[in-house]
Amino acid sequence: MAEEFLNRIRHKDLRARVTSADRAAELIRDGMVLGMSGFTRSGEAKAVPLALAARGRAEPLKVTLMTGASLGNDLDKILAEAHVTARRIPFMSDPGLRRAINAGEVMYIDQHLSETVEQLRTCQLAPIDIAIVEAVAITETGGIVPTTSVGNSASFALLAEKVIVEINTSQSEALEGLHDIYIPSYRPTRMPIPIVAPDSRVGLPFIPVPPERIAAIVFSSKKDSSAAVDQPDGDTRAIAGHLIEFLKNEVAHSRMPHHLHPLQAGIGSIANAVLHGFIDSPFHDLTMYSEVLQDSTFDLMDAGKMVFASGSSVTLSEARAREVMARFESYKGKLLLRPQEISNHPEVVRRLGLICINTALEFDIYGNVNSTHVMGTQMMNGIGGSGDFARNAFLSVFVTKSTAKGGRISSVVPMVSHVDHTEHDVDILVTEHGLADLRGLAPRERARVVIANCAGPDWRDALTDYYERAVTRGGHTPHLLEEALSWHDRLRRTGTMAPQ
Amino acid sequence: MAEEFLNRIRHKDLRARVTSADRAAELIRDGMVLGMSGFTRSGEAKAVPLALAARGRAEPLKVTLMTGASLGNDLDKILAEAHVTARRIPFMSDPGLRRAINAGEVMYIDQHLSETVEQLRTCQLAPIDIAIVEAVAITETGGIVPTTSVGNSASFALLAEKVIVEINTSQSEALEGLHDIYIPSYRPTRMPIPIVAPDSRVGLPFIPVPPERIAAIVFSSKKDSSAAVDQPDGDTRAIAGHLIEFLKNEVAHSRMPHHLHPLQAGIGSIANAVLHGFIDSPFHDLTMYSEVLQDSTFDLMDAGKMVFASGSSVTLSEARAREVMARFESYKGKLLLRPQEISNHPEVVRRLGLICINTALEFDIYGNVNSTHVMGTQMMNGIGGSGDFARNAFLSVFVTKSTAKGGRISSVVPMVSHVDHTEHDVDILVTEHGLADLRGLAPRERARVVIANCAGPDWRDALTDYYERAVTRGGHTPHLLEEALSWHDRLRRTGTMAPQ
Ligand SMILES: CC(C)(COP(=O)(O)OP(=O)(O)OC[C@H]1O[C@@H](n2cnc3c(N)ncnc32)[C@H](O)[C@@H]1OP(=O)(O)O)[C@@H](O)C(=O)NCCC(=O)NCCS
Ligand SMILES: CC(C)(COP(=O)(O)OP(=O)(O)OC[C@H]1O[C@@H](n2cnc3c(N)ncnc32)[C@H](O)[C@@H]1OP(=O)(O)O)[C@@H](O)C(=O)NCCC(=O)NCCS
């Protein structure tokens, strides 16, 4: 092992634990629960999972795989196809794993991202046998310095029986100092989490694991996957435009200061594009308290619009990753990465008063949102952090394009086929056509605004017709139960929601 | 005015503001927003609302009525029938008002009970013109001492342009000292809420209103309504039994201490009966951090099982109210009443790690819960605090009888007709038949357990048949969209969910 690599293990005794990925993977036995680093395709352990998949192809080997969130480098696909993943917790976004989940081959427990480690530390989920954590370095005291994500790594490492550390030499040593590892104390004698602003630093810059629990150290050099987000298009620019107009009006009415409140933006192309839209806004001195920091965060910093961003991971496109890492020192004072329990913590989200912008697959005329289940049955990704944020937001915004699949699907429907966010957790809905401000409105009032402002023009009459016939039956939230899901059923049968 | 009554106004200058309810009600003009005390039929202002209803019968007068939660003394019925209530926020449980809401005559904005005042203080709801607050007394400094509930009264009084105080002489002066009024600071510079245990006292024993804002003081002597909860029956005793067995097992496996975690129990007969069931349990030194304290809280204290209870109101049956008030001093060190924003605050709920027990109207085989909408359309009461608690609970339990309306309705259904609590917020489901522990289970696994353990025997085959046919279509959460709501539709058409 080259000296320069070994220098990343500053606790000298631990250098003896360096081994190959194959040897490290031998620690893993059939039926174990693994807690792996990785959040929104950043900072996942890369070598040991591949060795595990290879074993899985050769021998019976099934595990419960817990992570922060989605994994990069096709690991979720590779592990699912090797039939190693029997259970998967709490989030994924890989098409191959998605297929296995929807076929009932993998049991998927899709959770609020702040909750997984709470359930683990109270033994409400089966305990972690082995944690596998990607690191930039190991400190003099044996502390693990994470890479481009924190996710659940800290609690996994602290709760696991054994820890495998993967030191990734392609991850810049400049990342050290970026992380703020704070773990809430045990209940019922827990103290308040002392974060009072996005830049509050309250923890350690490493995960403080007792060195004797580090069972193996592996070196790897595989890069993080690049973000695969689409660039802003006309529709997402229109969505951003409507939201910014709305926020300008809130500022004009003194409901918010000029620097707004700290922003949270969800995963995916649309949220990234909407955040990007703030570059052309009049707002300045913006801050973020979010989960994943995408290209748009750095675009806003470069444009002088954003002064600080707290997240749990950094996921960038290839070009942006090169630029950002080249002058990382210039960003370092403006960034913090926290455990996802803290980036998403209801206590902190509510205290800071976040503006939360998340993406819906579909929403209904009464303001209920489906973020996860296509046609009520097929899992897309998972609820992720959207529930942690939307429930506790100062302002909870959901965005989506008004139609999908070339116009065959209306994303504004009579009744959503699955509910992730109830009407109580949704303040603002935005599509390319406009914005519906649902605050203080009763369901019957919301229906009119949602149809008029958000639905695609081709679908408005059918929605109005549904609503008006439903109202003749009465009720606080009028519906025609025999028709409420008929748009989805028609899509299933005919490939389009439109009547033939 | 008798001297003994006037002595309740210790700020002497304010005695000049004493007037009649009719005169006080004249301050209220058409179109105003009123913030009234009252929570779970306790501590509501009683005289001014009646004067208002009388005016509403004689002249055009419509208001937005905000409260803590439900009002006693039929006030919601009287105000709705006088057509005074145009909008109602955030909770009600009155059959007369319910009828008007479901007919679309009153616009009802049903909210998480911790959120209303957050929206008010950030001007996201129309501002309060007049607050009307029932009080035991007014202190030397003009502070308002609430009666049997705090609800939203503190923030209403602090945010309103004018305050009308109703001193209720039937409310015991012994109540003074019971309240803990803490108001979170403005965001984004809010500090942590310093509550770290159910008995943490962090605020003032009165609402600190500037005396000049008190526009009128009215005397009344009408009593709080008695709680109308049904006594425990065989079914609710069975539900309590299943839950206590489960908790015993959690303690046996060291997942909880012998005194459990602080308990929250929802409104209504079933929650009250379940809590009552703890009397015969082996647990001791129990605490509550809840919304409404019902008979069962005092039964548990008398039985030596419960050492402290924090709530936002006390709602008792007639007999229990007499007993409790007769020896109130003996309970006083064991009780605190807080603003509902604090009793239900996500920050505190999560920090204390509550065991939350709320009631469902129905739940589905995948663990989604409907607490509010009969047949997906007709509002029953509202979501109340159940969402504040369930989302942030250490353990989130929903209870219901397995059938309703003499067996014509199964409360376990293929798909709930309205979602208040998603699968992510539900750990445990209990009916008289048994308990389903959904922690760590994927939807397909949950379905089997829910059907086997919770459904009524007459409905199990039909549920299994639905589930098995749905599975043949695949999906993470299998459904037959064209049939998912057919049980409810059959009920609507034929009066029963059972096939003819
Ligand atoms: C909802 C979500 C899938 C949207 O992702 P996105 O990349 O911004 O949006 P897209 O419009 O590209 O949609 C993604 C896919 O869903 C499809 N889709 C969108 N609306 C749809 C609808 N109403 N019905 C069916 N499919 C739909 C799109 O066609 C696209 O399909 P493709 O992958 O085959 O091209 C994504 O935001 C998500 O998983 N959210 C849940 C988790 C979350 O919110 N986390 C945030 C907290 S950090
Ligand atoms: C759900 C809720 C209505 C149950 O109340 P309860 O008094 O414990 O339960 P009951 O079994 O007596 O049910 C109340 C009514 O609903 C009816 N009901 C119950 N299940 C039903 C179902 N599946 N379909 C239709 N009606 C149903 C009952 O028949 C009864 O009707 P009735 O008033 O005509 O007799 C009540 O708990 C509630 O409003 N919850 C929402 C708010 C909340 O949870 N707050 C707690 C936080 S503090």
Image (tube, coloured by chain):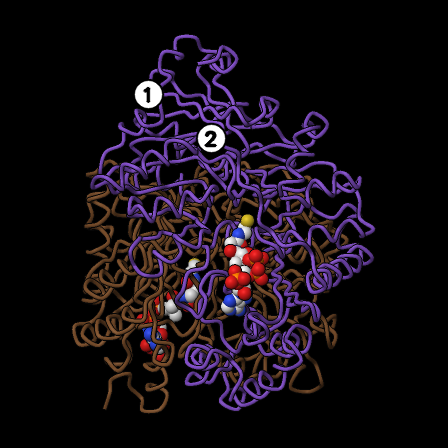
Chain colours: A purple, B brown
Q: Is mark 2 within 8 Å of ligand 1?
A: no
Q: Name the subunit of mark 1.
A: A
Label 1: which residue? A215
Secondary element type, mark 2: loop
Q: Position of residue B95 (x, y in %)?
A: 45, 79
Rendered location of residue A168, percent (x, y) = 49, 26
Q: In the rendered image of this protein, does residue B206 appear above or below residue B385?
A: above
B341 and B308: which is toward the camera:
B341
Note whether ligand 1 is within 8 Å of mark 1. no
Residue count near mark 1 (Cα–Cα under 10 Å), binned few <14, some 14–19, many ≥20: some
Q: Nearer the viewer, residue A17 or A259?
A: A17
- Residue A234 located left or right of residue B100: right
Distance between the alpha carbons at the discs numbered 2 and 1: 22 Å
Label pair 2/1, CB-CB below 8 angstroms: no
Viewer-proximal residue among A180 and A162:
A162
Residue A223 visible here: yes
Q: Chain of mark 2?
A: A
Q: Which residue is mark 2?
A: A183
Q: What residue sits 44% from the left and 39% below the top? A: B199
Residue at horizontal 33 percent and vertical 49 percent from the top: A81
Please tell me if label 2 and label 1 are on a single chain.
yes
| Quadrant showing the N terminus of chain A | top left
Q: Nearer the viewer, residue A279 or B149?
A: A279
Can you say whether A37 is above or below B434 in the image?
above
| In this rendering, the label closer to the viewer, 2 or 1 | 1
Where does residue B415 sit, x and y in percent of width and height? 35, 72
